[in-house]
Amino acid sequence: MSSSHQEGQQGHHPTFKQYVLVATILFAITIVEFLLIWPRAGVVDSLGYSKIPLLAILSAIKFAIVIAFYMHLKFDHRLFTWVFLAGLFLAFGVGVALLTLFLSLGGEPRAYALERAIPYDEHAVELAKEKAKERAAEAAEATPMPTEPAPDATPAEAMADTPTQASEPASKPAGLDGQEIFLGSGGCGACHAVDGVSQGLVGPDLSHLGTEAASRKPGTSAEDYIFESIRDPQAFVATGVDRAIPGIMTAAVTAGLSDDEVNALVDFLLAQK
Amino acid sequence: MAHGVETAHHAEEEYTTTGLNHRKLLMWVFLGSDCMFFGALIATYMVYRGQSLNGPYPIDIINVPVTTISTFVLLCSSFSMVQALAATNKNDQRGIKIWLLATAFLGAIFIGFQVVEFNTFKNEGLTLGANLFGASFFTLTGFHGAHVTLGIIWLLGMFVLAVKGRVGPATALDVEILGLYWHFVDIVWIVIFTLLYLIGGFDAGPAPASGG
């Protein structure tokens, strides 16, 4: 009694040896793939973007080997192959269509994200804390010895001025637009909201900093406080301000700004009443 | 061979217009549709690739070497699945049990790797809701993991039948269909591994801000 469903597959089952061979090929391809992309293997740099088609071809070969031999499609009735390929091609088509849509309608898809993305460094927070500690230790060492700062400064004055040259904000910036820096080269707008200017949510809302800054740090004027907050954000972190990612604003964020630019920012923020 | 097996065998030989077994054809149709299911999830991942606004980004947490090992484990399980079917066709009762259990065991190791991976990611701050990367990554690999888990349950069920001596040449089709499902899960992983780990695993976020 010949069973109809076995038609086309009888006598074609690969032998144990052939299965071992297939498995070995699959293993070998996977190892090659890994070596292609693992930085320490040293190949990936010379490949550049050609690694993508290369990897795609290699895994397509693996894919084909598994369905042809392990899933017997090579030896089975054609209809199984067509039924499966129909789904596979539809899936592929959906993927290509979706990617095309996003690329063509949305322009460069990364551009939007890159402008607004926040760098991630799992150690940044700890590093910042360490630095703050070091600085606090330095300040503690420096204060008992009034010889370090200007000779006529009293210890109390020295303490207030320690991390930054707080006398600097007095010099007015010449022709620099604070709002422009805030949105542009400073990149502040990505993290801070200012009414009618920016919508950043990561840091505190600065819409009314002009009125609030004076009471932030005891013994520090609004101007000095804002200057310090930008030049050396870790020196003093105000309590009770609303922010999504505390500690992400480090001195590195503003290191590229000149003192004049910072002063322009201070003026701009002071005007936010 | 038990009488019940004979009956099942006869039921298998019903007339079909295609001359092909309905259940096997059904499995292939299902696998074709599952291609579309995973195709949609993979396409979603690719579209959102590199668009997360905050970390962790893939390069911060994806561990390619470890996942290469779990990929090997899954490849091994496909090999043992093939051996289980071969043993079934040869009515090698001991072989059937060993290979079925080995396949389920290897699948479980793969899932173990995934559980550890997901847990590590969670501890490093990547959750389903952390960013686009987290959402598309967990949805895709999570559904794949669910497929593997289902396969393990199916394999264990088949193993129980094998212990009872109810798996043999007459029920080879049952094992074959199970094998089709298992290998399919393997090929889906081949694609996921290439796209999410080998190609996408080194995606970084924006360069650390220096000078604003």
Image (cartoon, grey):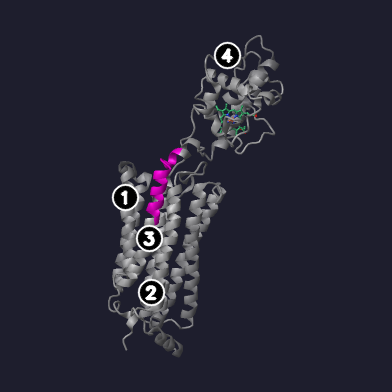
Residue B122 lies, with reference to residue A262, above or below; the image says below
Task: Name which quarter of the figure residue A31 lies in.
Answer: bottom left
Q: Is residue B177 covered in magenta?
A: no
- Identify the subunit bearing mark 4: A
Mark 1 or 4 closer to N-term?
Answer: 1
**Residue at 57% across / 35% down in the picture?**
A200
Q: Which residue is mark 1?
A: A53
What's the residue at 53%, 50% (across, down)? Answer: B121
Q: Chain of mark 3?
A: A
Have a look at marks 3 and 4 and say if they share a chain: yes
Mark 1 and mark 3: span between their CA atoms? 21 Å
Marks 4 and 2, how far apart at CA: 80 Å
State the residue position of label 4: A172
> Which residue is identified by label 3?
A90
Per the image, the residue denoted by label 2 is B25
What amino acid type is highlighted by mark number 4? Lys
Question: Which range of residues does the magenta coloring cover?
Answer: A94-111
Q: Which circle, 1 or 4, is nearer the viewer? A: 4
Q: Secondary structure at mark 3?
A: helix
Q: Is residue A249 visible?
A: no
Name the magenta segment's main secondary structure.
Answer: helix
The residue type indicated by label 1 comes to: Pro
In this view, the mark in front (2 or 3) = 3
Amino acid type of the residue tagged 2 in the rendering: Leu
